[in-house]
Amino acid sequence: MKRLRKIGFSKLTSLEDALNQLFSHIKLNPIEVIKTAKSLNRILAVDIISEIDIPPFERSAMDGYAVSAEDTFGASLQNPKKVKKIGEIEIGETSELVLNNGEAIRISTGAAIPKGADAVIKIEDTDIEKNIVSLYTSLVPNKNVSKKGEDIPLGTQILNKGLEIKPEHIALLSSLGIDKIEVRKKPEISVFATGNELLEVGTPLEKNKIYNSNTPMISNLIRIYGGNVLRESTLKDDKKIIKDTLIETAKDSQVIIFTGGTSVGTKDFLPEVIHEHGTVLTHGIAMRPGSPMLIGKVSNTIVFCLPGTPVAAYIGFLKVVGPTIRKLMGCLTIDPRIELIAKISKDIPVSAIGYISYLRVKIEKSEEDLWAIPVKLKGSGVISSLTQSDGIVEIPPHQEGLKKGESVIVKLFPK
Amino acid sequence: MKRLRKIGFSKLTSLEDALNQLFSHIKLNPIEVIKTAKSLNRILAVDIISEIDIPPFERSAMDGYAVSAEDTFGASLQNPKKVKKIGEIEIGETSELVLNNGEAIRISTGAAIPKGADAVIKIEDTDIEKNIVSLYTSLVPNKNVSKKGEDIPLGTQILNKGLEIKPEHIALLSSLGIDKIEVRKKPEISVFATGNELLEVGTPLEKNKIYNSNTPMISNLIRIYGGNVLRESTLKDDKKIIKDTLIETAKDSQVIIFTGGTSVGTKDFLPEVIHEHGTVLTHGIAMRPGSPMLIGKVSNTIVFCLPGTPVAAYIGFLKVVGPTIRKLMGCLTIDPRIELIAKISKDIPVSAIGYISYLRVKIEKSEEDLWAIPVKLKGSGVISSLTQSDGIVEIPPHQEGLKKGESVIVKLFPK
């Protein structure tokens, strides 16, 4: 019993259970309407149905002549068919011209097919002399004609709610004339690093102190995951300061992230304060690094206490906080990291059976394969083990380790 | 000769030659100093050397007792060694305590090792009763002690110029106390879509016209690649409008991107205007889609004319414009796209020998492999061929095609 109190939590929860419980408390953020052109990286709140046909009219796919396919039958370089040019249609133009057999109309790519025409012959397959056009190839009807709605018929569901919007989606929405869309509001998030040892970056170094690197790291992770950083600072290990900050910040932040103060030091007040003013959902997760994590709720605000060591805080963010931010926005992919398959370059024993282990690796390319090279590290405080790596390999709780050459999934760091 | 005039450029340049020539005209953007915490995705302009040691002092890697390792020699669960607790050192604290043989000082993770101590015994390996601490394990000197500078010694080059800054780099810079850094200014870029057929998104659909999707797509690609969008609009196919816009915009934009108007239509004025007011560096690149691309210079401004069809404009951006933006910032990786190795799911014949072909593919995961599934497409105007794909496979100019099951490199779309 005494041993358990020292560890600070009597039982570690599996990451899966912790996330399931947490997600049962999440309500979707409200919707806001924004300009499509300004929607990069936002999360679509509704399905998008095309209200027009794409293309919106029958148009030419080539520069050439609009003709009746019938007039080209049997045409070849040796035996050209001849028709009379009766006019021109430029892109964007609405022409009254009507084509009859034996005639051709000069047409640009993207211009509307005139009445009477059912094919377009490429300019390269023709010659013209005194308004008489020689056609050197035979066309089937509809050749080089893009039919109305052939790319996207009116009524098609073209994008799904929960999508993270990228330039190609903005292009698609714009081509449908959709200039405003409904997206989920960005969660408002505050970040505090706790610890008497922390100095603000930009102040002189003091004896036995270190610079706070957690809040700038986490704020920028929040931005990548789509949240909005509301407040950001360091706090002393003082119960009153921590309590007042928590209560005040819970009024306007949907998520509060603390780093440090969750372990078993005599000054680790966070678990106590959250228990007194809200609910501790999980304290201690079976993951390494990152086990002393706490997930709680104060009013409607989700509170995370991440370990104070930067690498553990980083991994805790990727596995728990980031997915929460995206869940709040109804995002389909709550973990946006790209996965590669690679071969592990050496045997990796795992000491902590029962924990998910996170191995930092660098990716190297050989002739045929990608290799995941474990980055040697001395502890979860060493930030350079992150800056020298490309991503993370997860070793499941009951696997004893990895064998050299084994295929592993590498999740690249979020960008 | 007549045939050549129709094509609009007498000879296609290889992409490699076009880029080499273009890059020889690029001067690095000036440097600006910004807050480290606000430097996400910016490009570092100088190498960063650590001016302090990390850790900055000798500190405990564990919660436990600072001791003299000598006092633990031979200790075990059956045969504990006993020492006297003489005080406590919290993290961030500067203590006057000095440890003598036979003594222990309670110490938190991250706290400074007191004078006289050379090891830390974990709290789990001890018990305490009335100030007498039982030590249950034997320690070698320096056990659980992080030496000053052991992660990063003063004077280490920790980050290289040209790096794109991510949260982990911001953490590293912050931990070194570096609150401001030198980065390259963002290039100022203007984007114009030309064409009489173009409607602004948000206006009613008109007969035989289409909505402009190129400028919102390209503006957001510019943002992803690190540029700043200065101006953005559509232009009529009118030589005077195009000329005036080009000359005016060249005064304050480092890069101007036009879409449309580079082919052989009677209203394709761009090549002419650029030739009259600057230099055409390349017109026509051996790539598909994207071949009618033009690269030019007007005063010190780089001018790109991309094809008007959205997919060709998109690929032209990825291969030429994007790398130029990053080159202007001195970025080490001018193409930021992530590469996967996958197997192609079916035979792909290539019709246009001599051109680089860009195949849009979707990625699917099977048991052991990633598969690249070609996305069927009808032309370079079909934006949904992008939204249904994950990335692009490049087929080199003199390769006849791909065989089912062959390994290919897929470059994922930029995010």
Image (cartoon, coloured by chain):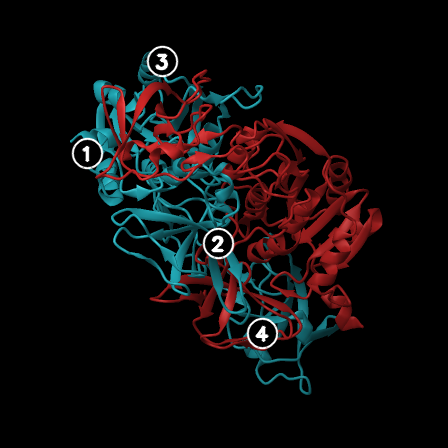
Chain colours: A cyan, B red
Q: Considering only order in the chain, which callout, 3 or 1, is on the residue closer to the N terminus?
A: 1
Camera-side residue: B28 or A381?
A: A381
Q: Amino acid at mark 3?
A: Ile
- Circles 3 and 2 on the same subunit: yes
Image position of A183 (left or right of B24): left
Q: Residue at x 26, y 23 (%)?
A: B132
Q: CA distance from mark 2 to mark 4?
A: 26 Å
Disc marking residue A101? 4
Q: Chain of mark 3?
A: A
Q: Nearer the viewer, mark 3 or mark 4?
A: 3
Q: Amino acid at mark 1?
A: Ser
Within 10 Å of disc 3 (Cα), the crowding (few <14, some 14-19, many 20+) is few
**Where, by quadrant of the figure, is residue A134 drawn?**
bottom right
Q: Badge 3 is on which residue?
A: A241
Q: Badge 2 is on which residue?
A: A56
- Circles 2 and 1 on the same subunit: yes
Q: Considering only order in the chain, which callout, 4 or 3, is on the residue closer to the N terminus?
A: 4
Q: Considering only order in the chain, which callout, 1 or 2, is on the residue closer to the N terminus?
A: 1
Can you give x and y, in whole percent of width and height, for residue A22 in the image? 25, 36
Q: Considering only order in the chain, which callout, 2 or 3, is on the residue closer to the N terminus?
A: 2
